[in-house]
Amino acid sequence: MGDTTKQITAQQVKDYLLEHKDFLIKEQDVLETLVLNTSPQGTISLAQRQVERLQASNQQLHNQLQALIDNAILNNTLQTRIHQLSLKLMDTASLAELTAMMLSELQQEFNADDVALRLFYQHDNKIEQGEFKGNVAYYHSDDDDLKQFDKLLEKQTPICGRLNNGQKEFLFNEQAEQVKSIAFLPLSSIPCVGFLAIASYDENRFHTDMATDYLQFLANVIMRLLRQYHH
């Protein structure tokens, strides 16, 4: 007769122990026969290995929790600052005062190097013009110079990242070459009021992975404040 002994593989033992996690607790005699404390130099016991894995898992969970807490604190702080900025802008009494405060506050709030505002008018629907201070310009919505921004405006949502050289030169003139990253905020309504470009000389300041919810809220507030000057 042939040998009918079936050889058990290491994988089968592993699978069995994974399915019966309390096996070594119930079968103390088996545990006593395992060589755990006399393992070769440089290795660790099963108990040590399990503790270390649990500690590593616990540290990972702790780091994830801390990241959530830090993010919540940051979002709460940012929300408060955006709320305060919105109130300041609402207290302005003229378009000139509104635009001046808008540019200075946004530059400070976002630690930016420049802020550009471009206002639109369509046919007889014009904005009251005043003495603008800062990087502000006023264009008919069909102006050829604005066509290079059509794709950005079509999205009607804030975009963070980079603009091409032509767009930067249109907005920032001689400083265009220094501008490395931008937060672009369409001030959309019917009709579109214009757009804001918050610029930084740091290429990592505004990037495509940034959350834009707070920028969208700010754009909506500014849009409504500017719209009152259409008549």
Image: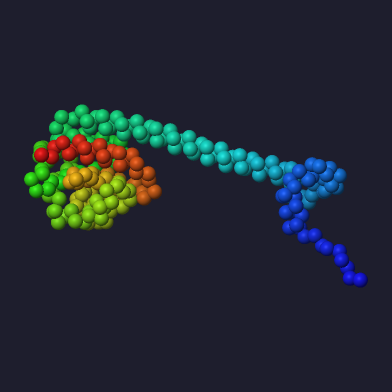
Can residue 87 be seen at all in this image of the molecule? yes
Q: Residue at x 81, y 42 (%)?
A: 26
Q: Is the N terminus in the top left, top right, bottom left or bottom right quadrant? A: bottom right
Relative to residue 151, is residue 70 drawn left or right? right
Image quadrant in which you'd find residue 52: top right
User: Residue 179 appears at what percent x and percent y?
Assistant: 28, 49
Percent coordinates x, y for residue 208 in the rendering? 36, 50
Q: What is the quadrant of residue 10 in the picture?
A: bottom right
> Which quadrant is the C terminus positioned in?
top left
Question: Is residue 111 shown to the viewer in this render?
Answer: no
Residue at image point 72% right, 50% down: 18
Q: Residue furthest front?
A: 1
| Viewer-proximal residue among 155 and 131 | 155
Residue 112 as seen in the image, left or right of residue 35: left
Measuring 83% from the left and 63% from the top, which residue is drawn there?
A: 6
**Image location of residue 221, percent across then percent down:** 25, 37
Answer above or below: position of 169 versus 100: below
Residue extending furthest toward the left: 124
Check the image and name the residue furthest to the bottom. Answer: 1
